[in-house]
Amino acid sequence: MIFKSHLISMLIFSGVVSTLIATIRFDELKKIKKEGIKLFLYMSVGIIVGSWIINFL
Amino acid sequence: MRPYLIFLLSWFIPGSGHFIQKKHTKAIVFFSGILLLVVLGIVMEGKFFLPYTETSNNYGVVQRQFHPLLILGFLGDLGLGLFNLVVNLLGFAKGNIESVTYHYGTTYMVSAGLLNYLVALNAFDIARRKK
């Protein structure tokens, strides 16, 4: 069994998915990198903040 | 090649629609990214969705009950094309609900299928623009 940590599983998932979506959307490497990093940050930070809020419910 | 054929080819083998349209780097990224998600999903002991649940009554008769959410998950997994076929034939992705990573593994695989639909649609769009 790998990735017992949910955080690492989520970060790897975000990394791969944001890379694929950025590659679908753009052709230039520079734009792909920018979009990929932006999506990765949106997903990761969104999930961390969301889980932190759920923690209080 | 016709856009619809490219869509089908790209659905069946992830990235192939881009490869035959000479977008080799993108094809490699799509193929390896989707393969990576599937392999991680299997290693995490996730499972492919079935469109139904099976229950057996007191007489041991097995009944199948279809559920809309399971059908959606099944359609998502179907997006993997050849990978879905190979994984099913090899008997992987049966899932182990006791595993900590079971839900993550299942999500990895269904997301890979959904992403492959997007990849195939992108290949279709590129082919249609060229025509």
Image: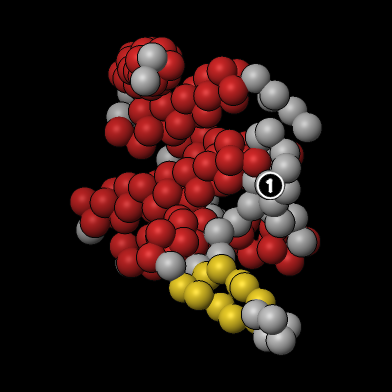
Classify the position of the N terminus of chain B by image quarter. Answer: bottom left
Q: Camera-side residue: A49 or B85?
A: A49
Asked whether residue B55 is in view, the answer is yes
Q: Camera-side residue: A9 or B84?
A: A9
The quadrant in which residue B34 appears is top right
Residue displayed at 78% across by 32% down: A1
Q: Amino acid at mark 1?
A: Ile
Write down the residue under mark 1: B97
The colour style of the image is secondary structure
Classify the position of the C terminus of chain B by image quarter. Answer: bottom left
Residue displayed at 77% across by 61% down: B90
From the viewer's perspective, is residue A32 above or below residue B48? above
The quadrant in which residue A20 appears is top left
Q: Position of residue A14 (x, y in %)?
A: 47, 25
Asked whether residue B32 is in view, the answer is no
Q: Position of residue B53 (x, y in %)?
A: 56, 68
Q: Position of residue B87 (x, y in %)?
A: 69, 58
Q: Camera-side residue: B40 or B7?
A: B40
From the viewer's perspective, is residue B4 above or below residue A31? below
Tag 1, which secondary structure? loop
| Residue B130 located left or right of residue B28 | left
Residue displayed at 69% across by 81% down: B58
